[in-house]
Amino acid sequence: MIALAALPVVLATLLVGARGVAALRSTSDFLVASRRISPTLNAAAVSGEYLSAASFLGVAGLVVKNGVGALWYPVGFTAGYLAMLLFVAAPMRRTGALTVPDFAEARLGSPALRRFCAVVVLVIAGLYLVPQFTAAGQVLMAVSGLPYWVGVVVSGVAVSVTLALGGMRAATYVQAFQFVLKLLLFIVPAVWLMTAVGPETRHDALHPAEFSRFTADTPVEFRLPTRIEVPAPMTVLADTDAGPVPVHLEPGPYVVPGQARWVFPAGADVPRIRGTALPGSDDWQRPLLDSDRSGHSLLATWSVLVATALGTMGLPHVIVRFHTSPDGRAARRTAAITVGLLGTFYLFTWVYGLLGGVLMPELYLSGATDTAVVELPGRVDDGTAGQVFTGLLTAGAFAAFLATSLGLLLALAGAVSHDLLPGSLRRLRLTALVAAAVVVPIALLASRVDVGAVVTSAFAVAASTFCPLLVLGIWWRRLTVRGAFVGMGIGLAASAGVMAASLLIQPAPGVTALLLGQPALWSVPLAFLTMVLVSLRDRPPPGAESAMLRLHLDETRA
Amino acid sequence: MTSPQTAVVLTARRGAVSSPPPRLSAVERDRAERLRRAQLRLALVGLAGLALLLVGLPILLDAVPELIRPRLFGLPVSWVAVAVLPYPALALLAWRQLRRAERLERADENTGDDDT
């Protein structure tokens, strides 16, 4: 059974967790070890922690659904480390602060600001975590037929047990190993897929034709109620307990009930879904993002790029990694090497996206495109090879899910138990478990979110709050506590608040919907501007200038 | 070896982070200010390069949709421009930035030596 492929990954994580119990003895273990860790090794660890289910599964799924333009997402994910290298890596390392709340207090000396930062950490980590669990549930469902909730709960238990064992997190070399593992589990199947599909499919993938007619009887699983537009009369077979029942559809809108399996007949016209382009159509082939077909593809593309490129520096599970570098110079090298490592990984996403678009375009109907990556090998080869590669990709997806969600849960628990409600180490573990217990039910409800798209909203929040705080805090001596507070508050409201509001009011596709759904393009400049203007009318705290200047003093070498 | 996350957890809050920053000597202060200016200028140049890529490339692809017709290694050129090209470009920008930032620090160290 293919689902077992995830088992070695989970077991390995548990073992690493158990091993961590011994390592919990002292902080200095980490601090001393850090002096021996080379930037290359650390960059691999950063990448290992960063490559989540969104990278492994989400981007290729978005290509199937939204088209080639979705390949801009990983460009932004990578560019984030360049932005980090430009403005944050070295000075941030020199603060000695391990988290953004730490930084806020070290730079501006305000415990209240630290608590506010911790709340923002909760928002970002929550937005990042839920889709990870969703992806884990969908993958297990796709490869093993288990119900969605089983996958989510199993993942929740795996993560919780790892945390409860006390081995909070893998050490640097384990993360680095995780990166190599994910890289191999992504590249090798990609190469195999490209050779195994044969010249004809390869040609189709590179010259996509519009998916407007079913070429064979095509089953589609609808997990949730889905609105489709039927272009021409057709008779589909709906699976029921009593066997397949023919359903006649006249042209017009229909709502397919949830938990349904419909078989569309060969030769029928493919139903449309409002706001999405048919896979392979000209719109789909455009290399720009236009997720709701409102025609503002430049704005949509820039919005995602601003969020991802500027949000990376504020991700709670990423910043802490840079402290394994012994000094600012090594942190800078780590960031630079990470750009190269991530680029190597993302160079292969298009293979999955394009093959998914040609081999399983019907996924666009159900919207469950996040499983495209793990389902591809089975479509290409129904023998052992297909099963082996499905297993490999499932293991890789689980490695991605576990690495990121453990790091995030810990960042989240740290924010609660240190910055909000200070407590003991035991309390911290408990907080991590509670956090997992909160995230799992949310993931159960959020079964249709697109991993890549929701993760991008976490980036948008980070870019609108922590990015201005870090950049201005590091480079501008006049930043004040009030400026940081108001700027981050406005940034949080303009990103998280506005995105939540747009989910509720569901504006019609257009510029407004775009700017509300993906606000980074205006919320980031707004947060910067607010922070600067409010600070200018205020007086910086005493000692703030030397707190800032010393971040730029490179370590003297003996 | 403990993970950084665990270290966060274990670091006592009242530790080094919240203590007031050490005073800088006048010499250190000048050097820090010089470095800050130079590094900021360098970072802004790097940012301009990044913006050229992330703002300019979409504009180009939007303005010249014909780029989907010519092919490079079997892929339409406009797809190569988003699927492949940005990664070496980003790596190049990162490499340049790293080199120059380190050179700035080294150069300043040498001037400092000359002064004393």
Image (cartoon, grey):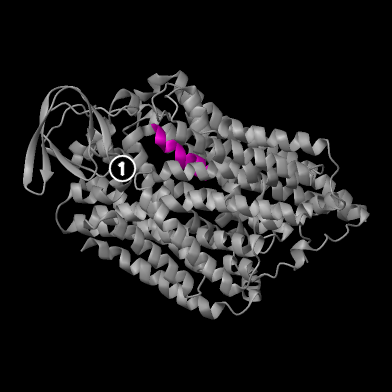
Residue under label 1: A369
Q: Is residue B66 above or below residue A33?
A: above
What is the number of callouts on the image?
Answer: 1
Identify the residue at horizontal 65%, vertical 38% (top origin): A490
Residue A106 horizontal side relative to residue A343, left or right: right
Q: Is residue A216 visible?
A: yes
Predominant SS along the magenta part: helix
Q: Secondary structure at mark 1?
A: helix
Residue A337 x, y percent position in the rendering: 56, 52
Q: Is residue A43 above or below residue B48?
A: below
**In the image shown, does A266 or A85 lie closer to the viewer?**
A266
Assign the C terminus of chain A to one quadrant of the image: bottom right
The span picked out in magenta is A69-79
**In the image shown, does A404 or B36 lie closer to the viewer?**
A404
Packing grade of label 1 (10 A; few <14, some 14-19, many >=20) is many
Residue B77 x, y percent position in the rendering: 39, 28
Identify the residue at horizontal 75%, vertical 44% (top origin): A475
The reply to whether the magenta stretch includes residue A224 is no
Q: Give the residue type that dot 1 points to.
A: Thr
Residue A100 x, y percent position in the rendering: 66, 54
Assign the N terminus of chain A to one quadrant of the image: bottom left
In the rendered structure, the residue with mark 1 lies on which chain? A
Residue A475 horizontal side relative to residue A454, left or right: right
